[in-house]
Structure formats: structure tokens, C-alpha cells
Image: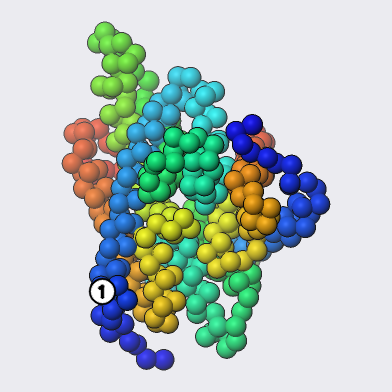
Amino acid sequence: MLGLDFSYFDLEVLRKFVLGGLLFSIQLTVVATIGGVIFGTLLALMRLSGTKVLTIPATFYVNGMRSVPLVMVILWFYLLMPFVIGRPIGAEWSAIITFVAFEAAYFSEIMRAGIQSIPRGQVFAGQALGMTYGQNMRLVILPQAFRNMLPVLLTQTIILFQDTSLVYAIGAYDLLKGFTNAGKIYGRSEEAYILAAVVYFVICFALSWSVKRLQAKIAIVR
Amino acid sequence: MTWDWQVFLTDDGSGRTYLEWMFEAWRWTLAVAASSWVVAMLVGAVVGTLRTVVAALANAWVELFRNIPLLVQIFLWYFVVPKIFPAFQQVPGFLLVVFGLGFFTSARIAEQFRAGIQALPKGQRYAAMAMGFTTAQSYRYVILPMAFRIILPPLTSESMNLLKNSSVAFAVSIAELTMFAMQAQEETSRGIEVYLAVTALYALSAFAVNRVFALIEKQMRVPGFIVSGGTGGH
């Protein structure tokens, strides 16, 4: 059909070329989500602290990251990391550090909105119970903010999974690279791109469908 | 480490300086982003409007273009489409990238249009019906103009995203800013200076988009109708 031939991409080829790439893409997504949420929450707390020493650098960092294309951020980190660490660093490690730093800026905006969505009475209630700032955040505010923002956080994670394909710029071995490599070796690049699109689509569609389900479930609980 | 900004004045081997090359690359970035924006707005408005009328087809469009990474979509347009449809072999690579970026963004803009239309008070629709407008007329003269104003803020950030996403065109050798950054870095070994200049141009362009939209928002505000947090009104 249409001069396409998918017969080269059997299980053996997929296991040999694609599996490792898929695992790296998933690893990158998971590490960047966890790291991004942790650092993003810290950035959000800094921005909401009301102390200029904390708000100004956090605002500068978040707005700076958000005004530059991700590809440029990936290139920047790949260029600068060897200077910072003092020795060459692989494309994969560079990608992981970049994504944590980049996603922290985006997750911080989500967490900031989440924290601001909590009624002030909750803060006062915590204070009235004699809680310190840390206890109030940890036990009262953040759990609720996190819960309110869960659908948005997960949607951002799906976008993040798609964005991991951009490590193409520094040649890290991810899902897309696995398919393009296999395609080059068998001279079947077009088929490889189509298969890559199908795999990404199936994963992202399934994830966004589950997020929708989750959203409906949370909405009922509230 | 010492700065060496004079690198921008050296010849790149083809009779132009790196500075001239960079501004040419900037023009490519702006050209890709502007053309894609036109495609994305037209298709996004049509699909977004259809989503409120014939949902299934429009939904499929949005899901398809939203769940595949932009880079993979660009590869599909650039390498796969011309192979399957020979008619596309005559189409220049620039246009294929514009289709890729434009359709990718159209799915997001369609979502905004749908949300904007659904956010309109029902009275607007009834008012159009009471005036004797046909469905097409009420969309053309009442619903879409109002919806467009409501979604201007999210449209602003989508347009800035589109500008940043145009950097993905480097992957299919469009001579835009990111491509320049990678090549000039390799040739001159002055990566930090080159990246700083390119990053500044991206930030400047994104800021310009932001200002233009703020101006449009101000100009198009309907008096007496508070839309998108505009101050004043009644």
C-alpha cells in the first residue's frame, strides 16, 4: 500500500532498537516530573513568600525559562554542563538535568495557582492551631493544592513526555531516536517515522483519557 | 573565561559576517512563525467552531494533532508526506514545516475557540436569533467576534508558544535561529556568545508578540462589555 513496507519492524528489531529508547523517554519523563514538582513547589513558595530577596530571583528564573524555546535550553545546558561539572557529561545525563530545571519553571506556575486556589481561611485555621509556616504548608496547604492541581500536573506531564523527543538536538537516545536509527539501518525511514507517531499517539491518548477519567472522579468527590 | 563578541564580525566563509547570518536566520524564524500562525488561526477557528456544531470530526482533529510530538509531526510532513503523495514533492520544505507547525498549533487554538464560544452568555445567541439571523450569520456577526475577544489572553500565550516552537524547524534544516546557533557554535567555538545573542532575539520576539496582542486587546475592547479582565467598562 502506497509503497510502504512495515515488515522490517518485527518484535526483534523493536526490542533491539526501540525498547531502550522508550525506557529512556519514560525515565526522563518520570525524573523530570518528580524533580520538576519538587523544585517547582520550592520556586512557587519563594514567589509567594513576599520577601523580595526570594521573590525576585524566583520570578526571574521562571520567566526566563518560559521565554526561551526548550531546544535552546537543551543546547545551553549541553554547552555549559562540562564547565560547571568540570568534565564532559553524556547527552542523556545532560537531558535529565535540563528537563528537571526547565520543567520546574512550568510546574512552579501550576503549583502557585494551586496554592492560591486554597481559601485564606485554611491558612488562618492552621495558624490558629499554632502551626508553624512549615507545618501549615506541609500538613494543610500543599496537600490540598496538590490535589486541586493533579489533573493539570498530569496534563503537563503528557506534554513533557512529548517534549522529550526534542533531545534529538543533542543526540540522546530516546524513543524517537530508536525508531530513526532502525529506519536508517533498514532504509525504511518513512515507515519508522509513521510507527513512532503511532506509538507516541497511543501512549499520549491513553494518558490524556485517564486524566479525563480522574478529573471526573475528583470533581464528584468535591 | 573572556568574552569575544567580535566573533560576530568575522566572515563565515561565504562572504557574510556571522551577524548578517544571524539576522537572516531571525527573518526565517519570524517567517516560519508568522506563516504558521496564519494557518493555525484559520484552521483553529474553523475546527473550534465546528466543535460546537459537529463535534466528532473536530474532536478527532484535535486529538490527532495534540497527541503526537511536534518534532515527529514535522518529520512526517517533511519526509513521509512527499513520499506517499507525490504531488507534495514540488512543495518547498519551508511550506511543509509551516503546515506541520500550523496544524499542530491549530489543535490548541481550536480548543481555545471552543472554550470561548461556550463561555459566551446564552443571551448573545438568543439576541442574534431575535434579530432574525441565520446560524451562519449569528456566528459571523455575533458569536465569533465576541468569542475572539474572550480568548485573546490565551491566544497571546499560544502565539508566543508558536514562536518558540518554530525552533523545532532546525531538525529539517530550515535556516532559522536555532539552526544558526548550532552551526555557528560548531564553526566558531564561541558557543556562549552565539547562544546569548540567539536567546536574546527569541526573548525579544516573544516580548514583541506579547505587546502586539496587548495592543489588539486594547483596540478591540467592546465598550461596556468587560472582557478578559480589561479595566473600565460599566
Say which quadrant the N terminus of chain B sits in: bottom left
- Residue visible at 53% across and 29% down in the picture: B59
When the figure is inspected, residue B233 is found, relative to residue B184, above or below; the finding is above
Is the residue A194 above or below the residue A74 in the image? above
Q: Quadrant of residue A7?
A: top right
In the rendered image, the residue lying farthest to the right is A12
Does A25 appear above or below B222? below
Residue A174: x and y in percent read 65, 60
Residue B52: x and y in percent read: 45, 23
**Badge 1 density bin: few <14, some 14–19, many ≥20, Cα 10 Å:** few
Instruction: Identify residue type, mark 1.
Output: Gly
Relative depth, front residue between A86 and A116:
A86
B110, A214: nearer the viewer = B110
Q: Would residue B207 be seen by someone viewing this image from the given angle? A: no
Residue A117 drawn above or below residue B15: above
| Element type where label 1 sits in the image | loop
Residue A25 as seen in the image, left or right of residue B46: right
